[in-house]
Amino acid sequence: MARVIFYEKPGCKNNTKQKTLLAAAGHELETYNLLKEAWTPERLRLFFGDRPIVEWFNRTAPRIKSGEVVPEQIDAETALSQMVGDPILIRRPLIQVGDRREVGFDVELVDAWIGLKPVDESLRGVTENLIQQDLQTCSHDHKHSHEQGSCKH
C-alpha cells in the first residue's frame, strides 16, 4: 500500500470517487486543496511529465470554456504561469507517490502504478462500479452556481 499525496478541489464529486477507490485499495491518503496550494511553475511542472500541454488543463475551467485561455495555443511557460495565478485551470487531481507525480485519474494508469484492487472483498462491487464511471470529466450540471469555476457538489 502506498502513501498517496492527492491534490483535489474539495467538494468535487469525481475527486471524492477517486479517493474512495484509493482508500478501498488500502492506500494512505494525504489530501490537499489544489486551489489553495502555493504552486510554483517548477513544482507544478513535475506533475505533467511528457504529456502535451493541452492535457495539463481542466477543460471545464471558466476561462477555458469562455475562450479566454486556449490550451492549444499556449506554450509551457505561459501555461504554468496562468495555472499558478489561477489554479482552477489545473487538471485534477494531481497525485504523488514517492518521487513519481501524475495529473488526472486514468484508472488503468493508476492501477498499474500503485494498484486499485480493494483490500476487502466486500468492497469489490463498489469499486467495480466506480471504475466503470468517467472519473476524468467533471460531471456537474453547468447550470448550477460555481465557486471558483468548478462544481460545488
Image: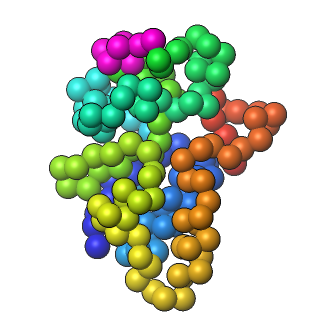
The structure residue drawn at horizontal position 45% and vertical position 12%, both measured from the top left corner, is 73
- Residue extending farthest to the right is 143
Instruction: Specify whether residue 76 is painted magenta.
Output: yes
**Residue 65 position in % (x across, y down):** 64, 22
**Residue 127 position in % (x across, y down):** 54, 73
- Residue extending farthest to the left is 99
Task: Judge whether 39 appears above or below 109 on screen.
Answer: above
- Is 89 positioned to the left or the right of 65 in the image? left
The structure residue drawn at horizontal position 41% and vertical position 60%, both measured from the top left corner, is 108
- The answer to whether residue 148 is seen in the rendering is no
**Residue 138 position in % (x across, y down):** 63, 43
- The answer to whether residue 74 is seen in the rendering is yes
Magenta stretch, main secondary structure class:
helix
Q: Total marks drawn?
A: 0
**Residue 49 position in % (x across, y down):** 26, 36
The structure residue drawn at horizontal position 47% and vertical position 41%, both measured from the top left corner, is 92
Report the span colored magenta: 73-79
The structure residue drawn at horizontal position 54% and vertical position 88%, both measured from the top left corner, is 122
- Residue extending farthest to the bottom is 121
In the figure, residue 59 lies in which quadrant? top right
Q: In which quarter of the image is the N terminus?
A: bottom left
Instruction: Specify whether residue 110 is painted magenta.
Output: no
